Image (cartoon, rainbow, N blue to C red):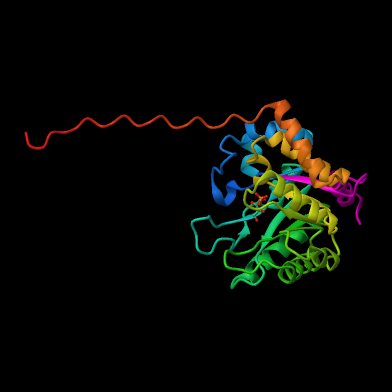
Amino acid sequence: MDWGMQNRISRIIKPASGRTVMLAVDHGYFMGPTTGLEKLGRAVKPLLPYADTLMLTRGALRYYIDPGVDVPITLRMSGGTSILNKQLLHEGSVCSMEDAVRLNVSCVAFSILVGAEYERDTILAFTKMVDEARSYGIPSLCVTAVGRDMVRDARYMALASRMGAELGADIVKTYYVEGFRKVVESCPVPVVIAGGKKIPERDALQMAHDAISAGAAGVDMGRNIFQAENPVAMIQAVRAVVHENAGVDDAYGLYRSLKSKLGAKAKPRAKAKAKPRAKVRAGR
Ligand code: 5RP
């Protein structure tokens, strides 16, 4: 493998553990101002010291992140549909490789939707990105997106992940499912898991632990970190699982003790009760 490519991968997948904690905050590209990321810069800043890479869009990077930060960037290169669209995830390229290079990114990410009517579009656009990225020594992350009505099981995830790798991905991002070992063992490149919708903190740590035990190289987690009651405590607990092989009880214990030390994230103030509208007398 080319030196530049290897060097970029090593900045993300830490050679000491062979693992990574990727912080995903790219949700705005199809979800807009996602809960917890309304003020993205402010939400992400305290998490950066614990993130091995930050995954986001070029807009979020330019508008919210200080160019002086020392964190490798994984740039979301695909998009084109919103959460309001029935064909959600029918994605194409939304960023040029020249702009990715200008932004000095360490990795580029693209979603493919295997099994959907339009899978071919997403796959061809992904492979085009891989070719361009390779010419600059930039690794590619393939996100195996899953449509709303699609079955999430090990057979499907293994199929989509293996395809991602054979089509040129250097890292595959997929979802944790029962029998995950099959997914990892049949994929020749490192596999990381997305967090998915917010679940209780202990359950998210359990999922990360189960994925690591099954051979995953780490997590690319978003909502289960930035929507946690205390995101700074949560990312450190996730790190303990990923980089230190912490068990779930220990990681959750760490989360709770950090949370009480750091203080729970300020809860949104309850909405002020609407003033009762002045009664309008019927008839004048
Ligand atoms: C969708 C994505 C995301 O936008 C995001 O990275 C997912 O993170 P999480 O599910 O952990 O919130 O990759 O396919």
Residue 271 in the image, given as x and y percentages of width and height: 44, 32
Residue 86 in the image, given as x and y percentages of width and height: 50, 63
Magenta segment includes 52: no
Image quadrant where residue 115 sits:
bottom right
| Residue at far left of view | 284
Residue 159 in the image, given as x and y percentages of width and height: 75, 71
Q: Find the magenta span and give its range.
A: 1-23
Residue at left offset 78%, top offset 66% = 179
Residue 84 in the image, given as x and y percentages of width and height: 49, 56
Residue at left offset 92%, top offset 50% = 3
Image quadrant where residue 173 sits:
bottom right
Magenta segment includes 10: yes
Q: Is residue 220 above or below residue 185?
A: above
Q: Where, quadrant-wise, is the C terminus in this rendering? A: top left
Query: Left or right: where does residue 43 sit relative to residue 211?
Result: left
Query: Left or right: where does residue 83 sit relative to residue 260?
Result: left
Residue at left offset 73%, top offset 35% = 256
> 31 or 109, which lies in front?
31
> 23 or 209, which lies in front?
209
Query: Left or right: where does residue 86 sit relative to residue 223?
Result: left
Q: Where, quadrant-wise, is the N terminus in this rendering? A: bottom right
Q: Is residue 19 above or below residue 258?
A: below
> 113 or 231, which lies in front?
231
Using the rendered image of the protein, determine whether residue 51 is visible from the camera's viewpoint.
no
Using the rendered image of the protein, determine whether residue 153 is visible from the camera's viewpoint.
yes
In this rendering, the count of numbered labels is 0
